[in-house]
Image: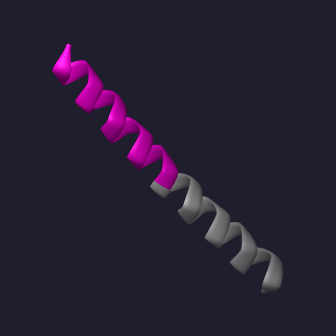
């Protein structure tokens, strides 16, 4: 159970980081 919670938290953090990277890349592409 605890492993599932940790796995879900890691996936959430990874998704958040990827979303931020994609958002920054999108803004850079639009500015360029």
Q: Main secondary structure of the magenta part?
A: helix
Residue 4 point in image, percent of width and height: 25, 20
Colouring: one colour
Residue 7 point in image, percent of width and height: 27, 29
Left or right: where does residue 2 sit relative to residue 17? Answer: left
Left or right: where does residue 27 sit relative to residue 15? Answer: right
Pick the residue in front: 15 or 4: 4
Extreme-top residue of the structure:
1
Name the residue at 50% across, 50% down.
Answer: 16
Name the residue at 31% across, 40% down.
Answer: 10
Q: Is residue 2 magenta?
A: yes
Image quarter of residue 23: bottom right
Left or right: where does residue 1 sit relative to residue 23? Answer: left
Name the residue at 74% across, 74% down.
Answer: 27
Q: Is residue 12 magenta?
A: yes
Residue 28 point in image, percent of width and height: 70, 79
Quadrant in the picture for the C terminus:
bottom right
Does residue 14 sit above or below 1 in this rendering? below
Left or right: where does residue 30 sit relative to residue 21? Answer: right
Extreme-right residue of the structure:
30
Number of marks in the rendered image: 0
Name the residue at 40% across, 47% down.
Answer: 13
Residue numbers of the magenta segment: 1-16
Does residue 2 sit above or below 28 in this rendering? above
Does residue 9 sit above or below 23 in this rendering? above
Residue 8 point in image, percent of width and height: 35, 29
Quadrant in the picture for the N terminus:
top left
């Amino acid at each position: 159970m605890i492993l599932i919670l940790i796995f879900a938290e890691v996936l959430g953090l990874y998704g958040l980081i990827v979303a931020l990277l994609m958002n920054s890349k999108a803004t850079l592409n639009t500015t360029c």
